[in-house]
Amino acid sequence: MTTSDTLLDASALDAARALYQDEGLDLPPIPAGFVPSLRQIDATAYATRDLDWTLYDFGHFLNELQSGKAVEPYVAFGLAGHGLTQQAAHYYAVTPHCAVLFQLRWGTIMDRPEQDRARHNAMLSIAQRLQTAADMLARSGKLPAGQRMVVADSSLHGARWAWMPANAAPQGEPEWHANRSAAVQALATLMQRR
């Protein structure tokens, strides 16, 4: 999906706030400097860049980071899916030192709204802490040079984290650390570098 196919809304941030407020969800953190380029790319989707796929296509976001192409910093978030059981809340934020890819099933007949809302909001808080910690460590020279921490957490595709080259193809398969608490483990790894 590209923004040229959709109507651009000058008040995308206001529309996003209203959408998340109606759902009872925290608005995803938008890294500094991204707000001016935020635009509505679909009825319930927002991004600072064009996308050739929907927010629901979690694998495309991850594959792009693993491809070796230079991925410029961006944020994309919203609600997307298909059918009765394949709906989710999404948050994708790529900065020079940290990429957080988050997908949580939301708005389906199988959900547990209060538990899922709490998990969503907690994950966004961890995402913001990951981004802040990675930026702080990069400024102090304590982050591996040329590396980006990638955290991928999906209720549909599992959770894992890895170090990847920021703008080059990984040499072989990245060393993924997969477990249900991957985001927390990734944050702990960053905090140990302080």
Image (cartoon, grey):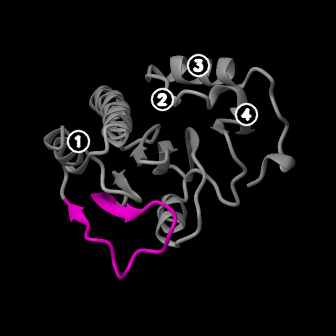
Nearest the viewer among 15 and 36 is: 36
- Residue 22 part of the magenta segment: no
Amino acid under label 1? Leu
Type of amino acid under label 2? Pro
Sequence-wise, the earlier of marks 3 and 1 is 3
Residue 141 left/right relative to 42: left
Q: Earlier in the sequence, mark 2 or mark 3?
A: 3
Q: Position of residue 157 (x, y in %)?
A: 36, 61
Dot 1: element: helix
Between marks 3 and 1, how big is the CA–CA gap? Answer: 27 Å
Asked if the residue under mark 1 is in contact with the one under mark 3, i.e. CB atoms within 8 Å, the reply is no
Residue identifier under label 3: 17
Percent position (x, y) of residue 40?
Answer: 72, 34
Residue 66 in the figure: left or right of residue 115: right
Which residue is label 4 attached to? 39
> Considering only order in the chain, which callout, 3 or 4, is on the residue closer to the N terminus?
3
- Examine the image and state in which quarter residue 132 appears: top left
Q: From this viewpoint, which residue is outermost toward the left?
A: 192
Question: Is residue 169 rendered magenta in the image?
Answer: yes
Q: Nearer the viewer, mark 1 or mark 2?
A: 1
Q: x, y percentage for residue 139?
A: 37, 37
Badge 3: residue crowd in 10 Å (few <14, some 14–19, many ≥20)? some
Q: Bin the neighbour count of mark 2 within 10 Å (Cα to Cα): few under 14, some 14-19, many 20 and up.
A: many
Residue 42 seen from this side: no
C-alpha gap between disc 2 and disc 3: 9 Å
Question: Residue 25: x percent and y percent?
Answer: 44, 23
Please report the bounds of the magenta region as a residue range. 158-178
Q: Nearer the viewer, residue 126 or 104?
A: 126
Identify the residue under disc 1.
Answer: 187
